[in-house]
Amino acid sequence: MQAHEQEFIERIRESSAIKQGEAVKSYQKQISVNERRLSEIDRIYKSLYEDKELGKIDEDMFTDMSDGYQRERVALRDKNESMQSELDDFINDGMKAEKFIEIVKRYTSFDELSAAMLNSFIEKVIVHEGVWSDGSVGINGRPCGTRTQQVEVYLKYIGRFELPDTRSADEIEAERLAEEKRIARRAYNRQKTQESRERKRALLAAEADDEAEDAESEPTPIPAA
């Protein structure tokens, strides 16, 4: 149990680290670049204002040039605010991951899964509508094939956690081949069922035609005098 607990904790930390990895470094670098450009724009704007005051440029030129720098300034500030907001989310994700790990460590060993444990771990469960692999193509439009139903479990602090596929390549290939066989078998059974229905319909139609012919060939009874 302890080994599985540690493995799960490591996966939680890895998931959080991925979110805070290259994206965080990239955002931090871009924010620094934008801040340097903002400082440069401030210097340019100050220089333009001084040139206008000294008569080196006229009012119209000052307005045209300063408007362009002002638009760039607003765009850079908006970008920095957006990236900083995402950085804050990354940091919060890391803190949430650690809080969830504290819950995991709290239940290192247990004999049965209690309601209190479920409430500690699970935030919400979303159950989607069931789906049939072959759709509604059976008798009277009844669903056919295999019924699957997606269930999403959201854990406290970390939300929906996707467990990695631990199957080997051979196991994945074996399951794929088995699924192909199941699909082929269902298709074969559907075809045989359809052929059987068509034969029954043809037989019933032939019997109805024979009865109609017999009725036409019977002599018309002569009424009594």
Image (cartoon, rainbow, N blue to C red):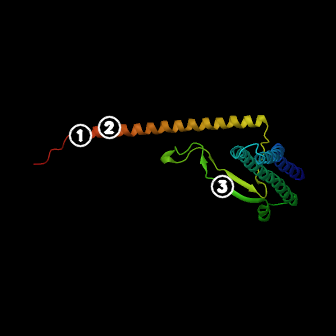
Residue corresponding to mark 3: 127
Marks 1 and 3: which is nearer the front? Answer: 3
First along the sequence among labels 1 and 3: 3
Provide residue 160's location: percent of width, then percent of height: 74, 52
Badge 1 vs badge 3, beta-carbon distance below 8 Å:
no
Q: Residue at x 44, y 36 (%)?
A: 199
Residue corresponding to mark 2: 210
Which label is found at residue 218? 1
| C-alpha distance separating marks 1 and 2 | 12 Å
Of helix, strand and loop, which one carries label 2? helix
Pick out the residue farthest to the front.
Answer: 55
Marks 3 and 2: which is nearer the front? Answer: 3
Q: Residue at x 68, y 52 (%)?
A: 151
Amino acid identity at mark 3: Val
Q: Is residue 126 left or right of residue 16?
A: left
Provide residue 206's location: percent of width, then percent of height: 36, 37
| C-alpha distance separating marks 1 and 3 | 66 Å
Looking at the picture, tell me which residue is in the foreground, 195 or 46: 46
Looking at the picture, tell me which residue is in the foreground, 43 or 29: 43
